[in-house]
Amino acid sequence: MQERMEDIVRERYTQWVNDPYFDTATKEELKSLAGNEKEISDRFYRQLEFGTGGLRGVIGAGTNRMNIYTVRQATQGLANYIIAQKGENKGVAIAYDSRRMSPEFSREAALCLNANGIRTYRFDSLRPTPELSFAVRQLGCIAGIVITASHNPREYNGYKVYWEDGAQITPPHDKNIMAEVAKVAITEAKTIPEDEARIRGLYNVIGSDMDDAYIANVKGLSIHPEIIAEQAKDMKIVYTPLHGTGNIPVRRILRELGFHHVIVEPQQAVPDGNFPTVAYPNPEDPNAWKLALALAEEEKADLVLATDPDADRLGVYCRNKQTGKYVSFTGNMSGMLIGEYILRERTKMGTMPDHPALVETIVTTDMAKPMAKAYDVDLIEVLTGFKYIGEQIKFFDETGSHHYVFGLEESYGCLPGTYARDKDACAAVMMLAELAAFYKAQGMTLIDAMEELYKKYGYYREGLTALTFKGIEGAEKIRRIMTEMRQHPAEMLGGNRVLAVRDYQSSERLDTVTGEKSKLTLPVSNVLYYELDNNAWCCARPSGTEPKIKFYCGVRGTSLTDSAEKLNKLMTDLEAMGDIG
């Protein structure tokens, strides 16, 4: 088996170095690796997998890398599927972020689609991912593509596919597109010159009109603009786009709403795919906040906000009035603050629709359960990934069963409207800034508001640990861990008894107390979820975008200290899972 893999790697490497289909720069990059068998093997031991959301990988030459050829190959598979669905005349919207090669990859995708007779609408410069979701629906496209690796480190880029409802692809389209991509040999993908595509009316450019429509929809979500008018003049906000796409739309939204004291961290304001000031451009990483927090201290800002490179995730810090220190909010915390505000104020104002629904993923905070109950709103749980939240909006439209009110996931993403079908940091910025103004009018901060939620619903705390295992051996290690957890499930975790195990791969829930088995209704996915006593839970799943296995967990305590102790105990047991398999 090992010898066969070595032969495959050598054959692929030789093809890329010699085939006239590949350009000179690609060949020279690969020739420079001669003798570095480990690197050559990593670049060619597999085809970069087109998963349920698209591609994501390290930029470079090779079949297991993000480059114009793997992008073109994926796009050819997508084109074949669009043609089979008779959607070529509807067209495809394309956006890209500030990462290295994003403009080039988006152009290659457009020209491959054009070569297949499919019209494209490509943004004239970088835009946030949620605006792509909006544009797909606004233009009536069959699909959308955004070139981004979201919050991954600088060496990565990615390729996400959206369908005509504006959400990332879900069953059956995801599996069908994957099957089409798998049929395409890398040298079979089509392309044409841009001049020819423009002359034929296939290559079109999206400009500022789309921005205006998108911003108008986001601003339309404001519940109390009159309170912003009263309080914004006394509020100071520090914001960082982390070298990404958020700077222009975020500042515009805040300015047009009346927040005029917005200070952008100057070293991180300019889009730059090398991310020179951060190793990991992720608002979830405390190290990404150093510059913004230093500026906030200087300015005595009320709020500190950060969006990830494609502006679909938002992180927030708030200044504690008593101590002057800045306190961070997890995605669960900020999501619950926004959720409570929307549900409470819409209920008060009589603007809550019939059959309202709050949608969250299975790894998001359990605080949403008592919150939804308090406002007589149905809580709907979906698999991890915001695409499943967007999919629910489509289902609601089709069936009339519910009206979407708010959706959130633990990883700093939420959507307070239906104009888009993906998480939107620009909208989250607007809602949190309005929230801060709302509570400021009552002499409170977001910290005070969060404490009120804890007192009302319970001291819920959540955690996440991710174990990284790279390369061929790493993928096998992750597989073994999941297999071991399935075959020998734990009886106790974090001092809590395991009450039930949900295996979303077999679509089966096992009640470990009674031994009773029941069917799960969510889509098949490589996910294990443990229901624990004492209002605790945990979940294991391999990442779909990075060489990691992720462990999520949550507890409910009687105080912040109590919940922190319970969470630490549970996290310790989960981190030890890396030693099995």
Image (cartoon, rainbow, N blue to C red):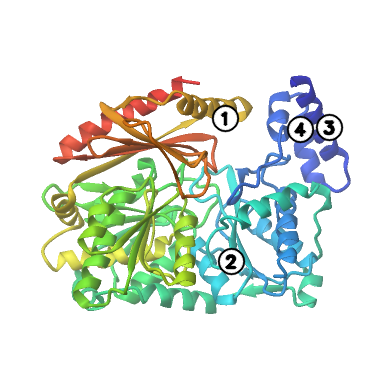
Q: Which amino acid type corresponds to the residue marked 1 in the rendered image?
A: Lys
Q: What element carries label 1?
A: loop
Q: Which residue is drawn at 33% across and 56% down?
A: 305
Mark 2 and mark 3 in contact (Cβ < 8 Å)? no
Q: Where is residue 52 in the image (x, y as percent from the top left)?
A: 59, 49
Q: Please say if the residues under marks 1 and 4 sit with CB atoms less than 8 Å apart.
A: no
For disc 4, the neighbor class at 10 Å (few under 14, some 14 to 19, many from 20) is few
Density class for disc 3 (Cα within 10 Å; few <14, some 14-19, many ≥20) is: few
Image-quadrant location for residue 9: top right
For residue 532, above or below residue 525:
above
Please name the residue that numbered disc 1 is placed on: 470
Mark 3, secondary structure of its residue: helix
Q: N-terminal of the two: label 4 or label 3? A: 3
Observer able to see residue 171: yes
Q: How far from the left and from the top, in percent, is residue 217?
A: 42, 75
Residue tagged 2:
125
Spatial CA distance of label 3 from label 1 is 23 Å
Counting residues from the start of the chain, the first of labels 3 and 1 encountered is 3
Counting residues from the start of the chain, the first of labels 2 and 1 encountered is 2
Q: Earlier in the sequence, mark 1 or mark 4?
A: 4
Image disc number at residue 389: none
Query: Which amino acid, mark 3?
Result: Glu
Q: Please state which of the two labelled residues, at mark 1 or mark 4, is closer to the viewer.
A: 1
Give the residue pinned by disc 3: 11
> Of callouts 2 and 4, which one flags the residue occurring earlier in the amino acid sequence?
4
Q: Residue at x 16, y 36 (%)?
A: 561
Q: How crowded is mark 2: few (under 14 residues within 10 Å), some or many (20 or more)?
A: some
Q: Give me the C-alpha separation between circle 2 and circle 4.
A: 33 Å
Residue 530: image x %, image y %? 37, 35
Cα–Cα span, label 2 and label 1: 33 Å
**Which circle, 2 or 4, is nearer the viewer?**
2
Task: Point out the frontmost of discs 4 and 3.
Answer: 3
